[in-house]
Image (cartoon, helix red, strand yellow):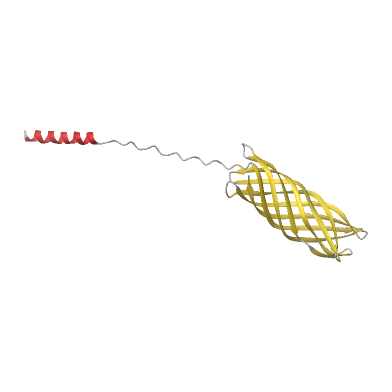
């Protein structure tokens, strides 16, 4: 009889504990919001700087000569582009820069400081976006001003040609991006009249620049 009483007491206690127990269902895991891919569409402005390597081919009559005019450069750029659904990015861009490449030139009867200063371009752009990185090719019209200072008398001529190249834009934030770019500029051939003597000049330039831009 005593064994039955103890058993009944244990069962009753277990029932009370079971009645008091509260089952707490585990909470569902919180879904993390997927990060939206960066979009490159829109207008932008920036600054760039770097170096340029200019080769000049000169001719006076049947006499010819060449020289190098290398130095630093600094300028601004801006444009507009549109990113398609397949990550292709198309756009148009312009830039204006200043080259410090003046060099003393003494040949073909010329003794003076020769170089280029202001230059610019208007180009199309075609690229592919890898989220934060935009790899692109670019090409279009280019212009520069050639200068010649002989005994304090300054002569200048505008050279028109083309530019081609490519680079990478990388988004630091949604609005700010960095840039590395290479371009080849062929400014074609022009003639400068120096005191009645026509000097033909054919200018070609390689440039490497880094930049920082802001998207709007």
- Residue 19 spot, x, y in % from top left: 22, 33
Toward the viewer: 12 or 70?
12
Q: Quadrant of the N terminus?
A: top left
- Residue 82 spot, x, y in % from top left: 65, 40
Which residue shows up at 82% across the image and 57% down it? Answer: 146
Toward the viewer: 87 or 216?
216
- Residue 66 spot, x, y in % from top left: 82, 60
On screen, residue 2 versus residue 78, left or right, reads: left
Which residue shows up at 83% across the image and 53% down it? Answer: 158
Which residue shows up at 81% across the image and 58% down it? Answer: 56
* Residue sitting at the far left: 1
Toward the viewer: 216 or 129?
216
* Residue sitting at the far right: 196
On screen, residue 12 versus residue 179, left or right, reads: left
- Residue 72 spot, x, y in % from top left: 72, 60
Q: Quadrant of residue 106?
A: bottom right
Q: Quadrant of the C terminus?
A: top right
Note whether 110 is above or below 190 in the view shown.
below
């Amino acid at each position: 009889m005593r064994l039955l009483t103890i058993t009944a007491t244990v069962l009753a206690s277990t029932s009370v504990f079971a009645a008091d127990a509260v089952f707490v269902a585990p909470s569902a895991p919180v879904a993390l919001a997927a990060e939206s891919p960066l979009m490159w569409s829109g207008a932008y402005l920036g600054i760039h700087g770097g170096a340029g390597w200019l080769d000049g081919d000169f001719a006076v009559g049947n006499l010819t000569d060449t020289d190098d005019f290398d130095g630093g450069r600094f300028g601004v750029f801006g444009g507009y582009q549109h990113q398609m659904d397949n990550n292709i990015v198309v756009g148009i861009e312009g830039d204006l820069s200043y080259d410090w490449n003046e060099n003393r030139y003494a040949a073909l009867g010329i003794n003076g400081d020769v170089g280029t200063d202001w230059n610019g371009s208007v180009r199309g752009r075609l690229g592919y976006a890898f989220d934060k990185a935009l790899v692109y090719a670019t090409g279009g019209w280019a212009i520069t001003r050639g200068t010649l200072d002989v005994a304090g008398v300054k002569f200048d001529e505008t050279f028109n040609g083309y530019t081609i190249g490519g680079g990478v834009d990388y988004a630091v934030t949604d609005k700010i991006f960095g840039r590395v770019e290479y371009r080849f500029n062929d400014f074609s051939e022009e003639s400068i009249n120096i005191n009645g003597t026509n000097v033909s000049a054919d200018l070609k330039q390689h440039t490497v620049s880094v930049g920082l831009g802001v998207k709007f």
